[in-house]
Image: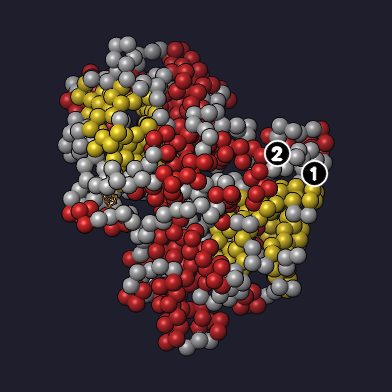
Amino acid sequence: MKKYFEFKKGIFSKPQYIRAVDGVSFSVNKGTTLGVVGESGSGKTTLGLTILRLIEPTSGIILFNGRDIMHLNRDELKWFRRSTGIVFQDPYSSLNPRMRVKEILERPLKIHTDYDEKTRSEIIVKTLEEVGLSEEHLMRYPHELSGGQQQRVAIARAIILKPLLVVLDEPTSSLDVSVQAQILNLLLDLQSKHELTYIFITHDLLTARHISDYIMVMYAGKVVEYSTTREVFTNTKHPYTLSLLSSIPIPDPKLKSRRRIEITGEPPSPLNPPKGCRFHPRCPYAIEMCKLKEPELLEYSKEHFVACHRASELDFTELLKDITSFFA
Amino acid sequence: MPRTLLSIKDLRVYYETIRGYVKAVDSVDLEIYEGESFCLIGETGCGKSTLALAIPRLLPPNARILSGSIMFKNIDLLKLSDSELEEIRGRDIAVVFQNPMSSLNPVLRIGLQVGEPLVAHFKTPWREALISAIKQLSRVGIPDPHLRSKDYPHAFSGGMKQRSMIAMMTSCKPSLLIADEPTTALDVTIQAQVLRLIRELKEEYGLTLLLITHNFGIVAEMCDRVGVMYAGKLVEVGNVIDIFESPLHPYTKGLIECVIARRKSKSRLSQIPGAPPSLINPPGGCRFHPRCLYATSRCTSEEPGLIEVSRKHIVACHNYVR
Ligand SMILES: Nc1ncnc2c1ncn2[C@@H]1O[C@H](COP(=O)(O)OP(=O)(O)OP(=O)(O)O)[C@@H](O)[C@H]1O
Ligand SMILES: Nc1ncnc2c1ncn2[C@@H]1O[C@H](COP(=O)(O)OP(=O)(O)OP(=O)(O)O)[C@@H](O)[C@H]1O
Ligand code: SF4
Ligand SMILES: [Mg+2]
Ligand SMILES: [Mg+2]
């Protein structure tokens, strides 16, 4: 995979740019959210980890605040680590079971700052309160917390150094609906308070829609569609995005018998993707060319990128009517 | 008037643990009608699986059924011996689990497993059972069923395993299919395929479906009636439109709002404060009262019974709001 990301933070908080995949550049304003959606194995996590330089891309460059993060010197790398945070899907396995909440939150402060113990404690308590926990939880071990509380601790850890960018990898997927709502509210609050930029990875399109300003749809390791959330949901261009939208169960019994296109087959292994368009074996709209040539991610209209040979001729508005009617 | 297929009365299922009894299902009454799709919804640990698996008595060894009756076609399943129940299980009542490997045997070829219930329950000769199995595999959408029936489960993807389990479970055309989170582990496009398969088989075989899920989208797509569980109690039963559009129980209201509010981008979701209680020492009175916005002093002391607000809509709340 080629991964080019560019986060440019202008002096006057101009947009941060993300330049991704195949040299196309996307822009995400500071303090907003890019949602990354796709099914299992589509490469969402890989993308998130690459952006944070937790794994190395095979090729390409990633720019953050104008700096190429693949070529940072030691100080710059330290600065980069400080400026970014990550939250994983499974809070329990991402928290060290032998560390108390206090120690979990203290670690990044010890590594990245030279605050004294008193200052550290103050920051820890303040951050805990920000995520809806309190001093009472300081001395607990992760297993003494509920799933939602564990995720709050993971979020506290990710934001304790006041990062610019936080990658959230399925942060609500293992949680119940009522707890999901609490965590999503928390994330939105923290975002507006600290002007955080989020990369929000999820396979749940409804959640992605709720939290994101821009959405990137991935399939078998490739970005197939990227645009503003509104555009992706109302002016869907890629057949895969359409089939995702058709497949999500919509919580409205009146839409039970809506028209949908249902794709057959299963996602390919990312290690051995089909030739041509990776989606072609499952695509109801595939033509001969799709088997032969891989479509490029092209700007179909302003800020709307699509990787499909037929993007300019296919129109899904009719098919999407019911789903769009669900959204306010 | 719909005919009742399954009638559960005053069912209590507790788990014995060193810390005390976990009151997983506590005095639940529930009727399921012939031919309907009934969904049980509720958050993790509220007792959905325990309630559903008490019906075919597939509970863990530390489960204790303390009271109640489960009438299925005029037989009280709780009064049957294990071997009598064994007869009904797989033939009349089938269960599909979230993890297909809990039903599939890893060292047996798929075809044998799908055909086995026919041999066991109807004494069908193996040759015929295998032919049926291949038909059934083809019916659930396994490509090249002839060849694939000779595969072992590990050669199948998650979606194909789930299809095979459904093939096996429906091979005797049961009258009740219990599906416990059958698609939770699957990708959305595969989930849509499997849900459609279940809907189709339900129509074809005239099955009654008891579906367990925590996904309100699935509830909306799949079922006619809904039962909402909270902390071991059934708190509301109604038809699907009523549950979504005029829920009565404060807990149901809260859940529906959490879900529906996602219509709007970036809006704050309404949230239910707090977290579900321990089922070893659940709160007295209404179990939901510590989290309830409508709670009054009566709620802390007196447990609400099920109130029939209309013939089709039942709620357990002292202060239910229309
Ligand atoms: N472009 C790619 N080329 C080759 N392998 C890839 C590519 N993208 C991802 N992979 C591999 O595919 C596997 C799944 O990728 P990843 O974990 O990123 O997917 P995901 O979208 O996060 O899936 P999930 O929803 O299951 O978390 C990983 O082993 C990863 O190394
Ligand atoms: N074998 C067991 N021993 C003790 N407690 C148990 C056992 N199995 C389940 N429980 C407890 O009983 C309660 C109900 O569990 P059950 O599995 O029925 O919930 P559920 O609604 O199906 O949850 P989920 O959505 O997570 O599947 C939970 O509090 C659970 O922790
Ligand atoms: S390029 Fe072809 S196969 Fe791929 S999504 Fe578009 S129409 Fe379908
Ligand atoms: Mg992932
Ligand atoms: Mg369960």
Q: Local crowd at mark 1 within 10 Å, few (<14), some, or many (≥20)?
A: some
x then y, percent, for residue A136: 58, 25
Dot 2: what SS? Answer: helix
The answer to whether mark 1 is within 8 Å of ligand 2 is no
Q: Residue at x 70, y 34 (%)?
A: B292
Residue B303 is tagged as 1
Q: Residue at x 38, y 56 (%)?
A: A263
Dot 1: what SS? Answer: loop
x then y, percent, for residue A66: 23, 20
Q: Which residue is mark 2?
A: B250
Number of residue marks: 2
Mark 1 vs mark 2, foreground winner is: 2
Relative placement, left or right, of A7 versus A181 is left
Front-lying residue, B130 or A149: B130
The answer to whether mark 2 is within 8 Å of ligand 2 is no
Same chain for mark 1 and mark 2? The answer is yes
Quadrant in the rendering for residue A88: top left
Q: Local crowd at mark 2 within 10 Å, few (<14), some, or many (≥20)?
A: many
